[in-house]
Image: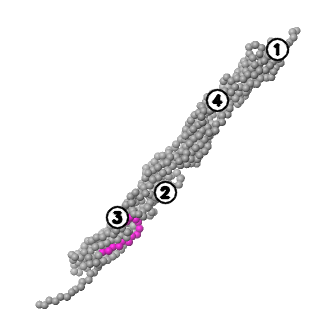
Amino acid sequence: MDTKTFVVNVGNVPPVLTVVGNQTTTEGSILSIIDLGTFTDPGFGPTETFTYTIDWGDGTIGDSGIPTIDVPGSAGVPTAGSFDGSHAYADNGQYTVTVTVADDDGGTDTKTFVVNVGNVPPVLTVVGNQVTTEGAVLEIIDLGTFTDPGSGPTETFTYTIDWGDGTSRDSGIATIDTPNAPTAGSFDGSHTYADDGVYTVTVTVASDDGGMDTKTFVVNVGNIPPTLTVVGNQVTTEGAVLEIIDLGTFTDPGFGPTETFTYTIDWGDGSPHDSGGATIDVPGSAGVLTAGSFDGSHAYADNGQYTVTVTVADDDGGTDTKTFVVNVGNVPPVLTVVGNQVTTEGAVLEIIDLGTFTDPGFGPTETFTYTIDWGDGTVGDSGMATIDTPGTPTAGSFDGSHTYADDGVYTVTVTVASDDGGMDTKTFVVNVGNILPR
């Protein structure tokens, strides 16, 4: 026999790759793709090996590995293989996935497909219902907390808080507490309610991609009654008008155009109460108390000590009451007597309105007595004076009559006294002429 040799140069044929069609998923979700890539290769045998890489198109580190040989090749039968893939996208968008398969001899094939990643709105949780009072600062830590399946440095969130009372909304950038998927964040809130009531707070969180969630909670705002201060004790006299500027001053944490205040003054003498709308001197605001005041004037009919009771009320029924004392002094009556008189011994001297008087005290309890000393040593006259004008001032009068036993010049002393001990004394002269005997 004879033997000869020759060389056969066998060229490598790269694998042929097929990838899945375009995919749809949402941010933060795990996109699992069975048979993401399938390939065939005419090479076969135990030395034939393959690798794959997947670039997911979002800048993250790609996946790589050794595919599965599904059909070991043979003469006339290509080797066939496949590999799966899974990935979670941090943010919504459209991503081109680049897939490459390579054989151990350096042959490669590359294919692409598109993944459309939809945005998922954040999920918001708000605090439970709250209780506060008007004018107080309501501070709420973690008023809103949220999660979002998106993640990454470009993921940002904003919030708005509508406090439900018609004021401007609060808004800002939420804090990212956990930047990994899922993203978790939070934000605080603070507000001062001007008036009591029940308010529904509407809270919204939004991602930079326009996804949002809205939740509500209720704030029950209680009324705070005004705080009243009254003047110190006062001194006046009966019948005089007691004028008191800023008789009452008050503060109230509530504020705003709907906040109004009324007052009543019980002067302690049984007269009708005074009442009216108080003046707002300082319109309140957040952190600034509403401040107001009111004046008062009164004339006491009689002397005595009176406790004045003052009440201020807000429009929501909150009240405060304080008292002070007025010491009212008695004022004696002022007496006027007739001019000097002329009569004769033995004649009856009749004098109408012998005495007239005025007194600033008034009212049904105000009474007056008089005494007349005729100046001749006889027992004087006395009695109850007539009240001619019961108003302010009270005016009264009394008459007198007397018969002098002998001629002479007599000084008549007249005194009028009120029921409270005040008195006035005046005199006049009576010239009594002699009558000759017959």
Q: Say if residue 40 shows up in the picture.
A: no
Residue at 44%, 51% in the rendered image: 141
* Residue at the spot of label 3: 30
Q: CA distance from mark 3 to mark 1?
A: 136 Å
What is the magenta range?
87-101
Q: Which label sits in the foreground, 2 or 3? A: 2
First in sequence: mark 4 vs mark 3:
3
Q: Amino acid at mark 3?
A: Ile
Residue at 30%, 75% in the rendered image: 101
Q: Amino acid at mark 2?
A: Ser
Q: Which label sits in the foreground, 3 or 1? A: 1
First in sequence: mark 4 vs mark 2:
2
Q: Main secondary structure of the magenta part?
A: strand
Q: Which mark is residue 328?
A: 4
Q: Which label sits in the foreground, 2 or 1? A: 1
Q: Which mark is residue 171?
A: 2
* Residue at the spot of label 1: 408
Whether 264 is drawn above or below 142: the answer is: above
Question: How far from the left and from the top, in percent, is residue 102?
Answer: 29, 76
Question: How far from the left and from the top, in percent, is residue 249?
Answer: 59, 40
Q: CA distance from mark 4 to mark 2?
A: 61 Å
Residue at 75%, 17% in the rendered image: 373
First in sequence: mark 4 vs mark 1:
4
Q: Residue furthest right?
A: 438
Q: Is residue 45 left or right of residue 415?
A: left
Find residue 405 and report its image quarter: top right
- Helix, strand or loop under label 2: strand
Q: Is residue 210 left or right of residue 254?
A: left
Q: Amino acid at mark 1?
A: Gly
